[in-house]
């Protein structure tokens, strides 16, 4: 049991932070990545969905843990609270969106979240996560391409992000989209960066 606690604690150091007051997200550059997918600002009523989404993301690493269900649920709820507090503290001017899609009945339903900090010349993709049923069908790629298009239209120098080093599927997704791996400050996370083609060309002319 002590080994499990130590292992889980090491995986979650980057989420430790004090609680802070959330800021209101700034307007999206264009919150419609595709015809059946939209982005909207996170609302207080989204908390149960966002917690369930976070639980689905963390589920694989808890499968081998012998904790009872109640203890796992308490751990997930605490880690989710700490993660969100860290995001809001580290990126107070970021956009925090819920990803919605249209279901068969024509209603918008939540399927994921996207958090993007556009406050600096290099944008930072804080989080992109989707429900398990929505993964592997191209939605993640659509959202990444939308970010890239928005970054180029917004004259961003680059887009950077961190991904857990054992999340090979996510790393492959970003690499396919043109992100390159760069040195990371965190032993548990890979750092990837994408530079808009126009910016890369300008840098090439300045530094032949």
Image (spheres, helix red, strand yellow):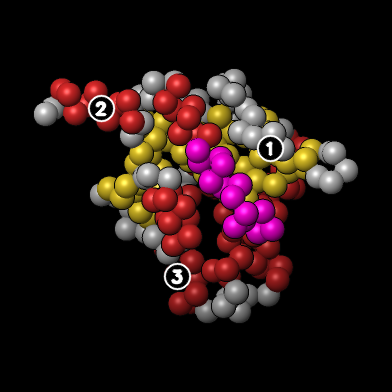
Q: Secondary structure at mark 3?
A: helix
Q: Which residue is disc 1 drawn over?
A: 37
Of the numbered discs 2 and 1, the one sitting upstream in the chain is 1
Residue 161 vertical placement versus 57 (above, below) = above
Q: Which of the marked residues, 2 or 3, is nearer the chain's N terminus?
A: 3
User: Magenta segment: does it hold 142?
Assistant: yes
Mark 2 neighbour density, 10 Å: few (under 14) some (14–19) many (20 or more): few
Q: Nearer the viewer, mark 3 or mark 1?
A: 1
N-terminal label among 3 and 1: 3
Residue located at (84% from left, 38% from top): 107
Label 3 crowd bin: few (<14), some (14–19), many (20+), radius 10 Å: few
Q: Are marks 2 and 1 in contact (CB under 8 Å)?
A: no
Boundaries of the magenta span: 132-145
- CA gap between label 3 and label 1 equals 37 Å
Q: Main secondary structure of the magenta part?
A: helix
Q: Which residue is mark 3?
A: 7
Residue at image coords 65%, 67%: 72
Is 72 or 161 nearer to us in this picture? 161
Badge 1, how many Cα within 10 Å: few under 14, some, many 20+?
A: some
Q: Residue at x 44, y 28 (%)?
A: 151
Quarter of the rendering containing residue 58: bottom right
Horizontal side of 182 relative to 65 (left or right) equals: left
Q: Which residue is mark 2?
A: 201
Q: Is residue 155 left or right of residue 23?
A: left
Q: Position of residue 208 (x, y in %)?
A: 11, 29
């Amino acid at each position: 049991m002590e080994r499990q606690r130590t292992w889980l604690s090491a995986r979650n150091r980057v989420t430790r932070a004090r609680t802070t007051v959330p800021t209101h997200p700034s307007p999206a550059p264009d919150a419609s990545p595709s015809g059946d997918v939209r982005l909207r600002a996170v609302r207080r009523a989204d908390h149960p969905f966002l917690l369930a989404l976070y639980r689905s993301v963390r589920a694989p690493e808890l499968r081998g843990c012998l904790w009872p269900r109640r203890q796992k649920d308490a751990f997930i709820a605490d880690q989710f609270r700490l993660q969100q507090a860290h995001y809001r503290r580290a990126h107070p001017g970021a956009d925090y969106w819920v990803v919605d899609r249209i279901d068969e009945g024509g209603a918008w339903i939540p399927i994921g979240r996207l958090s993007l900090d556009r406050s600096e010349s290099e944008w930072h993709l804080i989080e992109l996560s989707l429900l398990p049923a929505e993964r592997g069908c191209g939605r993640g790629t659509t959202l990444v391409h939308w970010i890239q298009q928005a970054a180029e239209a917004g004259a961003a120098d680059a887009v950077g992000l961190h991904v857990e080093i054992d999340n090979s599927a996510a790393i492959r997704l970003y690499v396919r989209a043109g992100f390159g791996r760069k040195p990371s400050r965190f032993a548990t996370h890979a750092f990837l960066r994408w530079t808009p083609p126009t910016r890369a060309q300008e840098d090439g002319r300045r530094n032949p």
